[in-house]
Amino acid sequence: MLQTAIITQRTNDEPDTEEIRRLTEAAGARVLGEVTQTRPRDPGTEFGAGKVEEIAELVEATGAETVVVDGELTPRQTVNLEAELGAHVIDRHRVVLEIFARQARTRRAQHQVELARLRYRLPRVREQSDEGALNRFTESGTPYYDLLDRIDELERQLAELPSVAEQHQQRRREDGFDLVALAGYTNAGKSTLLRRLADDLSLDTDRHDDLDETAAIEDRLFKTLETTTRRATVEGRPLLVTDTVGFVDDLPHWFVESFRSTLTAVEDADAVVVVADLDQSPTELRRKLETVHDTIGENRPPVVTAFNKADLVPSEERQQRVETVSDLAPNPVVLSARFDASLDPLTQTLLDVLSPLERLEATVSLTDETMSVLSWIHDECVEVDVTYDDEGTSAHVDVSGKPASIERVRARLDEFSVQKPIRESKQTEAD
């Protein structure tokens, strides 16, 4: 756990420490100072020799326990800097892990954090280890091989750990819900969009009893590893909308793999809404969209791109920015999740990409049992139209719903021995 830190940054351009400061503070550290340098990278210590000495003096003067480097350090650079500075040295990726560790609540999330930490430590422990000792004790007895054993154990435990969320998702899909995942970078506006879509939330809601803090609207870089799922109803069609963990710049492969299961909400969805911040340069917009698309893979569900924060972009520039990434987002929706009075353009586009509903017509005799069935059908299907004959002895039912829902309706009609659905009767006659 971080307590006090010096933040450092080496760059080829103009230094900007705002994000690494916010990351460090989000990880729980009190920032005691900062040092920046504009020059090419030093292969041994990242910084030049004079700057390393300056950092060491600041560490001694402030008593900081940790030096945070805004960038990715090699294992050798980490070991060399710790020897020179007399303090614990971590890079940007390790800071992100600290933030996730502070928010990991479930057993799965805690295992994922530990796995990522060990994968980060492994090459650094090897760098510090005596190569001869590693060759002599390859089975056990060294920190390096102990880490390998623990990584294997965690991977096995994660593979065997049942996912309650996935079980719930499957049951909801069987109950007729479409599953929609919100994906995108942190602070793109996914959580705000979730609140606008959810049946039981609004932008004025400060806190909901079972609302995970992923859906907090506050402008923060990270909040949790957990996803948040809420029910939404779009033109009578029931949806489950999941706000997934936000993407972050420059995360290494081992990091993404450690948290791979957080992407299951995207992989299992019926549609994905990629939320992108329109208030950034076309270059940044393209880079982030490419990263999101690459991460969620080629075999992803249908994608709707929502360019958010349009209220921050002059109207004459909006279309120009959208056109620069038209190859990545051919039919995007431009919106302001916070200020638009209606989200109809987005919800209509979403409905267009979801699998079409199936339709079933039937004529049933009216009894106490069938009246109960008709009441149940109203809850099961998206669209229900019931017309009664003049004598009040039968009713014509015309319903639309998810294929699974339609199958249950058909089975229920058969169960109560009411008149067969019209479509089935016609097929029987044709046979």
Image (spheres, helix red, strand yellow):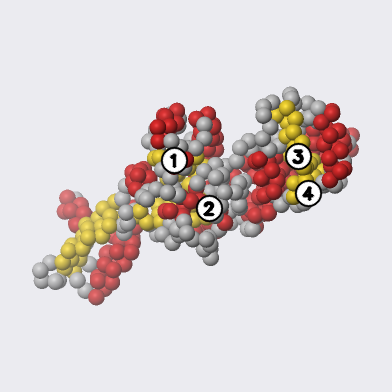
The three-letter code of the residue at mark 1 reads Ala
Q: For mark 3, give the secondary structure.
A: strand
Whichever of labels 4 and 2 marks the residue nearer the N terminus, that label is 4
Q: Badge 2 is on which residue?
A: 217
Q: Which mark is residue 310?
A: 1
Q: For mark 4, give the secondary structure.
A: strand
Q: How far apart are the two marked residues, 2 and 1, measured between alpha carbons? A: 17 Å
Dot 1, how many residues are within 10 Å of its Cα: few (below 14), some (14-19), or many (20+)? Answer: many
Left or right: residue 343 versus residue 358 is right
Q: How far apart are the two marked residues, 4 and 1, measured between alpha carbons? A: 38 Å
Dot 4, how many residues are within 10 Å of its Cα: few (below 14), some (14-19), or many (20+)? Answer: many
The residue drawn where x is 75% and y is 46% is 31
Asked if one can make out residue 202 in the rendered structure from this viewpoint, the answer is yes
The three-letter code of the residue at mark 4 reads Thr
Q: Can you tell which of label 3 and label 2 is closer to the viewer?
A: 3
Q: Badge 3 is on which residue?
A: 34
Position of residue 419 measured from the top left corner of the image (x, y, whole percent): 20, 64
Whether tag 1 and tag 3 are in contact, CB under 8 A, the answer is no
Q: Which of 313 and 298 is in front in this view?
A: 313
Q: Can you tell which of label 3 and label 4 is closer to the viewer?
A: 3
Dot 3, how many residues are within 10 Å of its Cα: few (below 14), some (14-19), or many (20+)? Answer: some
